[in-house]
Image (cartoon, rainbow, N blue to C red):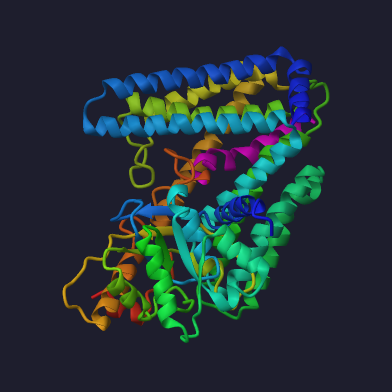
Amino acid sequence: MIPLFQPALRHGLLGLTRLLVGARASWEGSAPADTPRIYFANHTSHLDTLAVMAALPAKLRARTHPVAALDYWGGSALRRAVAVGCLNALLVDRTGKATAEVMGAMAAVLESGQSLILFPEGTRGDGTVAPFKSGLYHLSQRVPSAELVPVFIENLHRVMPKGMPLLVPLICTMRFGAPLEAVEGEDKAAFLGRARDALVSLSRPASQPNSQPAPQPSDRRTSR
Amino acid sequence: MSSVIDSVMTVFTTTEPLFLWLSGAALGLLVVATLIGAVLAYRVKTPAGRDTVRNLNARIRSWWVMVALFAAAMLLGSGVTLVLFALLSYLALREFITLTPTRRGDHAGLFLSFFVVVPLQYWLVGIGWYGLFSIFIPVYVFMALPSLSVLGADTTDFLTRTAKAQWGLMLAVYCTSHAPALLWLDIPGYSLPPALLLLYLMTVAQLSDVFQYVFGKLWGKTRLSPGISPSKTVEGLVGGGLTAVAIGTGLHVITPFSPLQAAGMSLIIVIAGFFGGFVLSAMKRDLGVKDWGTMIEGHGGVLDRLDSVVFSAPLFFHLTRYWFT
């Protein structure tokens, strides 16, 4: 892959994403800003990373790195060119063998003043938000200056439900919420629960009714 | 690039000076609207007034883009116009289905609706196969989609889901595709490019909307139906509708119609446009939203701008085809 093609490929991919799912940004509680941020989003489909990147303003997009799985995205030269060359992805080993290095690489991005996109559920859901894995907690402990911004990806699970090879174009909105406030002496479980609640609370817009399936029991538990 | 410029120049030099007049009129209207918007923005002081003027100026900005896109498509020929309308249908269908609850069992059918039905319908229009494009969605797709959905063996809301998907296709694709279908009408004794018929339909339908808005804002007092569309007023409807009919009558020079026939045609476009917008507003209330989307600044979604065309396009197409070809 010649580097010259990568901007064209990036524009093509982002344009295609917008044509398929709209990828509109709705800033609800935070504004676009070029400060080190950890955008954490619900994982709904293979298009999540592209959709969040397409929703960010171009200036911020160039300084934001989605965290992607090395085993898949580093698997071939083409995939690596798409992930790293086009989308600035930070490829990490998710086998758990190199936790310290992964954490170091993510912290280095934030410390250089740039941002990350994380999917703390670790797996794709069916429209509900699964409990978070602990990486978000450790990263926030290591770089406390980075803002934690929840991003709720609306509708994308309907575009490409798990196990469905076909894609139905629907308008997907990325809801950027207020940054998580720091709480002194909070333990890991409480922090992860609070972060997840912040994400879930973005799932019900004030002006529009819920166009998604009825809330699942796990949703109800956290919305108390 | 140079071939595009050549073809554009050819259109300019070979079509009647009429085209220049029409482009000039559209340009003039946009310039006047932009100037009025700028003056209002300077003079209005109340917060509510400011909001209205801000929305008005957003609408005018969007009109510049819409008129430019439409004019470019018409200049580049019937193929490009067809692709533009196919894209609008795709976007409108996307807005409709986004607001409609869907289930796993609908997935294959919806995929086909977007990526097979939309292109196929416009391809049928483009090859001029009237007999098939006029029944393809109401008959064959009507049977095919529920047949596919039923294989998902999910009966929850089956009738509702099926009906909503079919309505989406009828409004966003079937009805809308009758507008560019005007380009393929062969009217004896009509020497002007058939694109002018499409321009006529779009101008009367959209100006009716614009003038209903203007009359409603300036003199609107009697709400027509607050429960469905709070901004629609009797004064706006009558004033805007009559203005659009007057313009439609004056524009008879670009149609095969006599002035009286043009008045009748534009009256039908205005009435159908009103009911199209009204019915789609009722659907929005039912779905609990104010706009179909957010794509067109100040206006809402693509379907918010097309709502006056969905009912008037098939009517205008069939009346013209029946009486003038």
Q: Residue at x 69, y 65 (%)?
A: B143
Q: Which residues are magenta?
A: B303-325
Q: Is residue B258 above or below residue A121?
A: above
Q: Nearer the viewer, residue B178 or A200?
A: A200
Quadrant the C terminus of chain B occupies: top right
Q: Is residue B160 visible?
A: no
Visible in this render: residue B29?
A: yes
Q: Is residue A194 above or below residue B70?
A: below
- Given residues A168 and B244, the one toward you in this image is A168
Chief secondary structure of the magenta portion:
helix
Q: Position of residue B37 (x, y in %)?
A: 38, 23
Residue B312 on the magenta span: yes
Q: Residue B162: x percent and y percent?
A: 58, 66
Q: How far across and down, in percent of the image, does residue A27 sit? A: 35, 53
Query: Is residue A110 a member of the stretch shown in magenta?
Result: no
Which quadrant is the N terminus of chain B positioned in?
top right
Q: Nearer the viewer, residue B127 or B252?
A: B127
